[in-house]
Amino acid sequence: MKSSTGLFRKKSIQSFVQDAQTKSKLQRNLTAWDLALLGIGAIIGTGIFVLTGTGALQAGPALTISFLLAGLACAFAALCYAEFASLVPASGSVYTYSYATLGEIIAWVIGWDLVLEYLFAVSSVAVGWSGYFQNLLSGFGLHLPKALTAAYDAQAGTLFNLPAVLIVLFITFLLATGIQASKKINNIMVLVKIGVVLLFILVGIFYVQPSNWAPYAPFGFGGISLAAATVFFAYIGFDAVASAAEETKNPQRDLPRGILWSLGICTLLYVIVSAIMTGAVPFAQFKGIAHPASFVMDQVGQTWVAGFIDVGAILGLTTVILVMLYGQTRIFYAMSRDGLLPKFFSDVDEKHSTPFKATWLVGIIAALIGGLFKLDQLAEMVNIGTLFAFMLVCIGVLVLRKTEPNLPRKFKTPFVPLVPILGVLFCGYLIIQLQMVTWIAFGIWFVIGLVVYFGYSRKHSLIGKGPVQGKK
């Protein structure tokens, strides 16, 4: 059979499964419980510890509805993710799924999109981590030199965000030396973080004043939608769970469980925490507050709880960095193995059983970005990339149900085509809430990606050198 030359050439699902079984050098150590904690590690962090204050100013007490709206959009996408994860248990997440269903050019676009999403997510969360860490140090009377506390700002006298750089490099070291050690550290930090969130709930619920919830939606549904688009950043973590397919003991069974468990637990916690926050403190008081959860405890006189929350935030953001950086390296791994990126990115170190060199390269780049740019500059692009990825997964399920209805599916998305269509509509609605500058930046990144694809990836794609499934 001649090699395909079409832009929409596909790599068969059987080929992905075979590569994962015969070519992968990654170790299968993860269980459904590990995957759920991996997802919770990425999801519980920025949302509760940073974005709740911003969201409250946009939606008021109706922030709970914003989290439900964003969570519902994620739930539809998660059900589609779960079907693909059980069907294509290979590294690469939505990139891999798109390659099997929509064709190479779409897979490249979404893979390139995921690069941006994960890389900037790591850097932006590192900047947030730096703020909490410096706040904790100040509590002990310790202060870093002003020049090393934030990105360059001539008026503020800052040059470089040293803590942001160091935390990314530390996480890079953990990931490069092996997923087994990273898994244990992540699981411990996640359990501590959940404990801190539960402490906030158990203490804060006694300070809720229902009068603070009136009016419940002061800015109407527009404010609720804007807040939903803002806090969507908090949910991107479960995508990284799908990237762990080749390091999962029983991916067909455990990946769907890990994805759905992590999303369900986190949505419930987000709704409860946001209700308590806006019930204990009037939402208008969150203006300019970068640590809303501990701020609430300070306001109600529970300063000892605020201290625990600061520690929990540091651990929480640390796990987000870990999972996001992990997901980034596995996306590169999958794209490189297909020939779309240089082989360097899929070389697995024999000693550590990880893509050692690629992990360090990505980690260093993310660390430098975190050290040189401000938080608002970094976070602009993350949501649009995530929503775009989720929409493609939902479309992929519809396509595959039509083109290959008899494939053995260990998990089937319920109520097809309704669920995938709702996933596209909900994510599409949220994506149009984003600012025009975000769309422009996304367009520039998209054009750069096409240059790389036609200049390198298309020529080196392994699927173009042998039998394929799809257009000829």
Image (tube, rainbow, N blue to C red):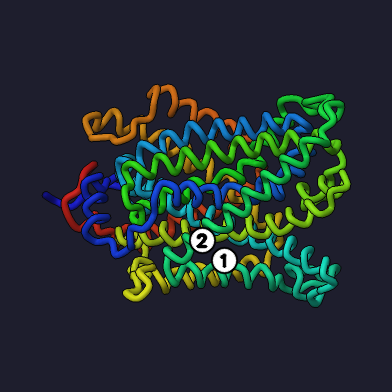
Residue drawn at x 72%, y 33% as measured from the top left: 63
- Name the foreground residue: 159 vs 292: 292
Please determine whether, in this image, residue 57 is positioned above or below residue 219. below
Q: Quadrant of residue 343?
A: bottom left
Note whether residue 434 is visible: no
- Name the foreground residue: 169 vs 376: 169
The residue carrying pointer 1 sits among few (fewer than 14), some (14 to 19) or many (20 or more) residues within 10 Å by Cα, namely many
Note whether residue 190 is visible: yes
* SS class, disc 2: helix
Amino acid type at mark 2: Leu
- Name the foreground residue: 353 vs 463: 353
Please determine whether, in this image, residue 78 is positioned above or below residue 314. above
Whether pointer 2 and pointer 1 mark residues with C-beta atoms closer than 8 Å, the reply is yes
Q: Which mark is residue 409?
A: none
Give the residue at mark 1.
366
Residue drawn at x 47%, y 51% as measured from the top left: 240
**How far across and down, in percent of the image, does residue 68 sit?**
62, 31
Choose mark 2 or mark 1, whichever is in front.
2
- Name the foreground residue: 204 vs 455: 204
**How far across and down, in percent of the image, does residue 72 sit?**
55, 30
**How far across and down, in percent of the image, does residue 292 sit?**
78, 47
**How far across and down, in percent of the image, does residue 392 sit?**
43, 39
Please determine whether, in this image, residue 295 is positioned above or below residue 456. above
Give the residue at mark 2.
325
Image quarter in which the C terminus is found:
top left
Q: Quadrant of residue 27?
A: bottom left
Q: Earlier in the sequence, mark 2 or mark 1?
A: 2
Residue drawn at x 83%, y 36% as measured from the top left: 207
Question: Could you give the CA–CA distance between mark 2 and mark 1, rounded to whole angstroms?
Answer: 9 Å
